Image (spheres, coloured by chain):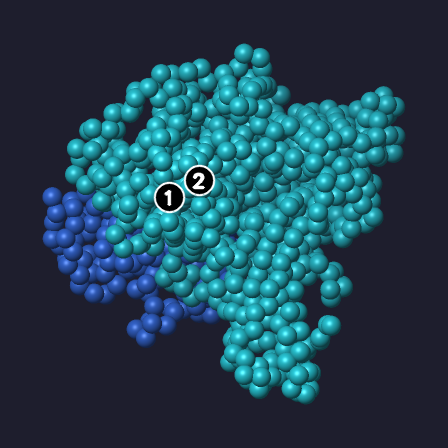
Chain colours: A blue, B cyan
Amino acid sequence: MSERLTLEVNGDEIVVEVPADEALVNTLRDRLGLRSVRPTCGLGICGTCTVQLDGAVASSCLLLTVQVEGRSIRTSEGLTNDDGGLSRVQQAFVDNGAYQCAYCIPGMVVTVEACLAESPDPSLEEVREYLAGNLCRCGTYVSILEAVTELVRGDR
Amino acid sequence: MTTTVDRLPGVLGLSIPMPDAEERVVGTLRYTVDHSVEGMVHARLVRSPYPHARIVDVDVAGALAQDGVLRVLTGADIERAVEIPNPYFGLTRRDQAPLAIGRARYGGDPVALVIAETPQSARDGAEAVIVDYDELPYVIEPMEALAAGAPQLHEEWPGNECGEWRLHRGDVDLAMSQATHVFEATYTSPMANAVPFEPHVAIAAWEGDFLEVWTATQWPSAVRGELAHMFDTDPGNVQVRVFPLGGGYGAKSQLKIEPMVAVAAKMVGRPVRLELERDEVFLTTGKHPAVMDIRTGVDEEGRFVAREIDLVYNGGAYAVMTPKAVAQGLLRSIGPYRFPNIRIRSRGVYTNTVPSGSFRGAMTNQAAFAYESHTDEIAEGLGIDPFDLRERNLLQEGDVFASGQVMHDIHFQELLRDVAAVIGWGEETAPTPGKAVGKGIAVMVKTTPPGTRSEVRVEMRSDGDVLVHTNSVDMGQGVLGTLTQLTAHHLGVDIGKVRVQDPDSSTFDSMTAGSRTTFVADHAIGEACESIRRQVAELADRSDHPSPRTAADYEEIMLGAGITSLIGEGAYQSPPSDALSNPLDIKGEVADHWHQGAVAVEVAVDVETGKVEILRCHGAAWAGRVVNPVRARQQSEGSIIFGLGPALFEEVIVADGQVTNPNLSDYMIPSIVDVPIELTSSSLESPDRDAAIHGVGEMTIPAVAPAIANAISRATGARVRQMPMTSERVLRAIVGEPE
């Protein structure tokens, strides 16, 4: 049983036809080619499939695509500037070497963007709590915190 | 003839981002999991639910009746297929088939493979396969597997023997009898999973006799060689392609699922893709569980006079590397100390569990936990400060290792002093209400893997571009960036001109593992660049052009001679050694250089609950020279974070022959809130500009768990000799209850 529905993905209205039991992560990856969204644990624990759903972070492996009809979804690909340049968060990650194998990094970027949108001047402890749902097996956490710290300080 | 060329300042020692940094951050970097091939079909495995069972019959009719299912393969099909002359593979013993033939040997052993048009139909087909098993007695614990009458895993290897190595030096019995004190303890560590986020994934495609495989592997050359053997073809007929890995940490070493897709693609005549689910990653490989008994004799001044070690590694159901790895396990069990008298036995054992394989800090984490916990237990017993006891016994430049090898480029004292200084060793810590606070230190040594080879081909073009061909795999350590910097350094060209190509299996490299790549690439690239410089100098001689000094001269000379491209080849080969020629008497040169690291931690232990909090942690690695400071630091700090998991909470649990926690809900890995706010590292360098560049991928991880165990002991007086040091274990140790 497939359903036809409209999503707003990275600012574009998109019509997809998906089985009722298809997870959003699969729609984004396999149908829309947004490969920054990655399933790792399938349980909403690791954060590599993190997207912004109407601005709030969500695990796209735990959502059915049919559940999010009409809603706005943003992935790391959709955070770049209009000219394709990196967002300030992405640039801070590059500048601080906040990536290793980088499988988890787009999900981190999506979370940090949401964190800073919600709380432009977060404490270190707040940032840590915000990122507790984004795991990095390479252990890049220190560089990631440095990237966020640089962004926050830059705002002051 | 040696030519000199002006080296550009600062090519080494600069934190130049990886060439693909932006793609990594945005998420557009392609991994193997993102790759697809025209016309490919999908595979799904059926796994044994029993730890040990005879496969009586596989009923595939229901699966074949499903929409889109093309074929169901079983071990029996593989055994009789004329297309697969050698159905067994393995880098030490060919004891594993792509699908179990006749017998399933662990809970999770693949017994059938469903090939279908879509991943969903492959999944549906796999659910419809009915396997009739005849359950057999099984064995999980290695000591039970060694006992007479134990269930036998492989007929060719009686007694479940999976490698045995010994080393002896001096007269241990005499020295023990004359020692002032003798200390003895047993330390254990369980299976852990490396949890690479990108799972094992591979695609195989045949065109006539030519096999092309895309796979997330750290060992493309080994995959190529072993697949060529299976199909009895020349390795030149097998091309292995590798994208950057979404994590490896040893889990993507050796061969894993490549034989399955190669066989499947051969049998259905279409490209076949297989991607493991998360639980299957847990059922594919793991860290060797280990039990280590240590006995140490000490004289009145606290000098180690004798040591005896008995070490048993659980190899799981198939050999993979275990028969050879336990030799490294032996050498890595000694620790960074002088022992005039030492006797060691290290054994690998087959059991009905997930096959053990490489794991970051391989065969070292288990041993370092034991010997560095033991060092502190000795210090405590003697009433000597653990720092002083280490200083007294650490190996130094020119000392003789237990194998008889004279050691050079040795820096344990500097590492110990570095971590002690940063953690404030000897300074009192302010007490915290309800919490016991303490500091711990540990030092580790890891041998380099023996008998390895790495080749590199550097191509200099007359337009100034430099292409580097290697078979080294980027798995997040940034090897492409590191090779770029090394090439720019050795050739004296602008870094922007150098492009390292994706791994290319026509260029041999034993593996990207064991923290060896930076060290060996420096040698191999140096040789290749020297060859290019020589060729350019010869061209200059012939055309009476002045000797080349800069990259611009290269271009001018090549253009003047009408040459568009020059190839320089280089290789690094481990020095020959017969140290491992007799398994029962290891002797001689066992390492071409020595991996050296240290860690210090400060912990707070909740004495009511046993919960351990890491307040501060500092790690140090001997780097020799640092190629890229940011990446060197990320290796040391990433290693510490990686090490926190198995130290404090990671354990693959086997109950009734089954892994019961193969997911990230029940098997937790460190998150950002597990990382101490103060986490720092040092990459120690030599003042010598030509000092050897050491790899730094695993220098801190082995020392993490013992440093924590020692800190817990100094905080609470309780000694935990089993990893992971969960709250329950720590609390039991505090209140003096046995497990």
Relative to B611, residue B459 above or below: below
Nearest the viewer among B615 and B449 is: B449
Q: Is residue B338 left or right of residue B133?
A: right
Q: Give the SS element for disc 2.
A: helix
Q: Which residue is mark 2?
A: B230
Mark 2 is on which residue type?
A: Met
Tell me if residue B681 can be seen: no
Query: Eyeballing the image, is B495 above or below B317?
Result: below
Question: What is the residue that sits farthest to the top in this orientation?
Answer: B149
Residue B549 placed where, x, y %? 67, 81
| Residue at image coords 68%, 61% | B625
Residue B326 drawn at (x, y percent): 62, 33
**Secondary-structure class at tag 1:** helix
**Label 1 sits on what residue type?**
Ala
Q: Residues within 10 Å of mark 2 (few under 14, many from 20)?
A: some
The residue wearing badge 1 is B262
Asked if B480 appears above or below A126 in the picture, the reply is below
Q: Would you place residue B94 above or below residue B491 in this image?
A: above
Q: Earlier in the sequence, mark 2 or mark 1?
A: 2
